Image (spheres, rainbow, N blue to C red):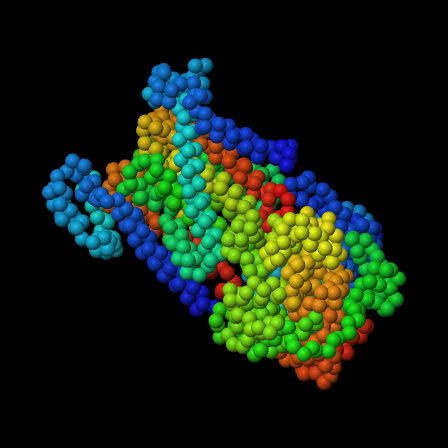
Amino acid sequence: MSIARIPIGALIGLVLTAMFLIMAIFAPWIAPFGNGEIVGEVWAPMSSAHWLGTDNIGRDLLTRIIYGARTTIFIAVLATALSFTLGAVLGFTAAVVGGWFDTIMSRFVDLLMSIPTLIFGLVVLSVLPSTMLTLILVMGILDSTRVYRLSRAVAVDINVMDFVEAARLRGEGTGWVIFREILPNALSPLISELGLRFIYAVLFLSALSFLGLGVQPPNADWGGMVKENKDGIVFGIGAALIPAAAIAALAISVNLVADWVLNRTTSLKGGRG
Amino acid sequence: MGGATVAKLIAQRIALGVLLLLAVSVLIFAGTQILPGDVAQSILGQAATPQALENLRRELGLNDPAYIRYFRWLFGILQGDLGTALSNKRDIATALSGRLANTLFLAACAAVVSVPLAILLGLLAVRYRNGIIDKAISGFALASTSLPEFFIGYLLILVFAVKLQWFPASSTVYDSMSFLQRLQAVVLPATALTLVVLAHMMRMTRAAVLNVMQSAYIETAELKGLSPLKIIRRHAFPNAIAPIINVVMLNLAFLVVGVVVVEVIFVYPGMGQYLVDHVSKRDVPVVQAVGLIFAAVYITLNMVADIAALLANPRLRHPK
Amino acid sequence: MAEAQSKARPKPRAEGALLDIRNLRIEATVYPPGEKPRDVVLVDDVSLKLERGKVLGLIGESGAGKSTIGLSSMGFGRGGVRLTGGEILLNGRDLRKTGAGGLRRMRGREVCYVAQSAAAAFNPAHKLMDQVVEAALEHRVLSRAAAEKRAIELFRKLSLPNPETIGERYPHQVSGGQLQRVMTAMALCSEPDLIVFDEPTTALDVTTQIDVLAAIKEAIRDTHVAALYITHDLAVVAQVSDEIMVLRHGKLVEWGGTHQIIKEPRQAYTNALVSVHQIEHQEHAPGVTPVLSVKNVTASYGGGTVKVLKNVSVDVFPGQTLAVVGESGSGKSTLARAITGLLPPLEGSITFDGRTLGNKLADRSRDDLRELQMIYQMADVAMNPRQTVGTIIGRPLEFYFKMHGRERDQRVAELLEKIEMGKGYADRYPAELSGGQKQRVCIARALAAKPKLIICDEVTSALDPLVAHGILELLLGLQAEEDVAYLFITHDLATVKSIADSIAVMYRGEVVRYGSKSTVLTPPFDDYTDLLLRSVPEMEIGWLEKAIQGRKMAGAGN
């Protein structure tokens, strides 16, 4: 697969996603100022010294965005990894093993999904301490229900196909069936879902932080930065929109990549690529 | 005819909904019991003496086993008693009633605009499939599912409240306001909500209608020489109505949840803002009550979606 | 009815042929994933002429372009198919030059369409009657009352049960065979000049097909409508057509009178299609000890009360073939599931190579599994699309014989030779093979285990006749070489005659007739076997009428 064959939309998505990742990883080296450093006036406009202006207490906004990328992406990645591992392992197992395990797991997931994620998240966060670990666990576990549903559905579809039956008739064990027969065929919908879950985690985390229930000061993710700067809006100062736009840009770029992955390999066509 | 069968299926679905709601109430109750600390600790803070804690626990009945407290809470709710807020000692039900009405008003305003608009745009996308309109709509959908609510919300405030000054920046409503004044107050939050759900609803409408339009019986109708309008009216519409109702209901559920963040952005005195305030204050009884109400609305809308699908299915209406 | 007719818009009626297609060219754009879209030619330079009241059969294998040509006679291209060249003259005017409004006035009025799957072609939301009369009302051919009266007459003519009330039903309330006839009535209702029948009996069981076929034939004769009859089955088309056109890869191969095509074909390809069923297979006498012995097996799904297998007993002898014949719902595939251990029987026992097999898959030894292999109907889904042919065939070698590396590759190459494909295919993925090649790879995978018995579940049903013929010959050759026994499950009696040594006929979960091929196929027959044998289309003009007259019981579709 050469670069020229990647559609322009996906290419933009890939480049932007990579840029955000680099920003997050190398934040201390890239950022022009220190994270908490007060370097100018309150809500100074964009200038050559402060490309994006300053925030509500005079910190450099670009620096905050770069460090915010770190927090946002770090928590979102871990939450996604947790939701994926948990959801996919349980989903595949439920599909292949079936029986009571499948019934109990599936009913429980139905129950969890009958409460809107944000509401349930708020209920739980009202009693848990506001730490990053809590956020990762709550987001990861709540979101794993979606992954569970998808991986179970995909695996159930593949599990009834004749080639899986042929493997069973040959005498293959459950391990071979899951990892050699089902997983390779379930990979592309799952990878695309990985992108969507990550976006969801970013948006969910931002919403929580915006509501003041996510990342706690002095740390700030992008959602928290929106909260910090929101009072400027009524004075016509758009500083709050900058972190919000960063969230949107990250989400759109990952979306473009996920869309492309899903379209490129439609699950059971198989073969090369 | 299959009236009896459908009635039975609907009864089953309603029973399932009630059961689900009960299970959800258990889950919400259990969700607030995870920590070793309890309400008494929250009220009195870390510095409280053991004796003061013990007194308050006895007063609030916290020494009873969890299941007894659960049933006490549940029966209270069934009788309309949502308990008392810890933070200000006020009756939750009284505090909520006005806010619930505000939230429903906002959600209804958004629904009145977004539902017809989404269906219209979804149909346009199908009509001009793969054309400019379709591409624009799916591009818009991609953007809108990636935009956080506060981006849309603050952008609206910045442009329409601060720069143009057409609408107030914060959507305060109070009892003495006239209907028109209220309407003016909710224009911006309702617009934000509409933009949040529109893309999703449109995309689902498009998929549902497209699914019907690609059926073999549409080709049959075309090969009978029917005009496009008649094909849509007579052959596509009766089969597309159920999936569309389904889409609408699911999105209304989505809308009711989206209200939470939008209310905070626009400082709108509804349930969402009330919930968020009390989560920060760790006011568990309020959070439980409001969480349960949100879940109930959500479950009911999903149930209506399922029932609509049942009613529209000819195989169930006319069994063999 | 003449009165009602006068209200209709006049139909153009030119002199000469009803349908005159000249140098037709049809193209479509395909969008292969990950590649640039490109145009493919579906039909190239095909001309045909159809007189009023005549029936022309269009025949060919999949991809021949026969349905595409059929729909072009209505000026219709399915899913982005474009009519790019030539003329399509219907009643004297060129459909390629007719606008959308003109095509609408023509469709459903001059030409009507009968689809392969009536179940999908009817709108589930409306009663049958409303759909049957719709075209007649739309084009103001008849008043509502007259149209309904005509519909009921047509229902009666097509021997549908309860012709007066069947129109009040919804599509899902009527069986597949009946629905196909209702669709024919729908096509006839607006009194068109031409009907396009697109594989109208292909999806039906043979004993249902014969009734639908007879009904269609009678309706065509009585209404004097012209027809394009599209099918892949030459024996079927020979019953209804005046002329037959043979197509291949979108090009015309041969066009002639029905008698000429089936008795004196001029082209090699036509000849191959005509002679396709004839493999002479001399049956072997049953041996002494069977390799597989099924004794009094009863089974049901989900432990339920509905028995899908009732007291079934059959034997398969080493190196021989037992054909299990039956229609859908006869329990023949369930028998395979019981033998393989996928569906543990409720009662009875299964003995294999002298030892009693465990009921469940988990109770069987690795040698039990190895010696009893299975080949599926749909080769596409019987192979993991993410594995190469080499992996697919090589896995049983690794798994059963611990063969690895060069030794395994060597053996894979040998097996590929055996299935006449050559070792170059080892690196291919299933998606890169043709339908016949896929089935061959599945055969090689089964052979790799050195089995004593292979269960073949409808292995040729999804293939075009010529390809299926090649697979049958391969199976017979391999049987002689490897001395493997087959349990051959099929609904197709012609296949049975080509391959079986003994036959079991199944009907509603029971074996109704069982014995050596010659005894089973020699009269006197029981009623069901008689029906089944008579229902298999023969390439003989007039077979249909003879078959219908001689039957002892009616087909299941009624």
Asked if C232 appears above or below C542 in the picture, the reply is above
Is C141 in front, or is C118? C118
Question: How many tags in the picture?
Answer: 0
Is C258 in front, or is C11? C258
Specify the farthest residue to the top: A48
Question: Which quadrant would the N terminus of chain A be assigned to in this image?
Answer: top right
B302 sits left or right of B89 in the view: right
Residue C34 location in percent, x, y? 64, 41
Specify the farthest residue to the bottom: C524
Asked if B77 appears above or below A99 in the picture, the reply is above
Is C170 in front, or is A97? A97
C329 sits left or right of C111 in the view: left
Asked if C268 appears above or below C349 in the picture, the reply is above
* Quarter assignment of residue B182: top left
Residue at image location 32% in from the left, 27% down from the top: A218
Residue A155 location in percent, x, y? 51, 53
Is C174 in front, or is A199? A199
Residue C56 location in percent, x, y? 80, 63
C85 sits left or right of B302 in the view: right
Residue at image location 50% in from the left, 74% down from the top: C346
Residue A152 location in percent, x, y? 48, 52
Query: Does residue A200 appear in the picture of this structure?
Result: no
C342 sits left or right of A90 in the view: right
Residue at image location 67% in from the left, 79% down from the top: C288
Query: Does residue B54 appear in the picture of this structure?
Result: yes
Residue at image location 31% in from the left, 51% down from the top: B27
Question: Which quadrant would the C terminus of chain A be assigned to in this image?
Answer: top right
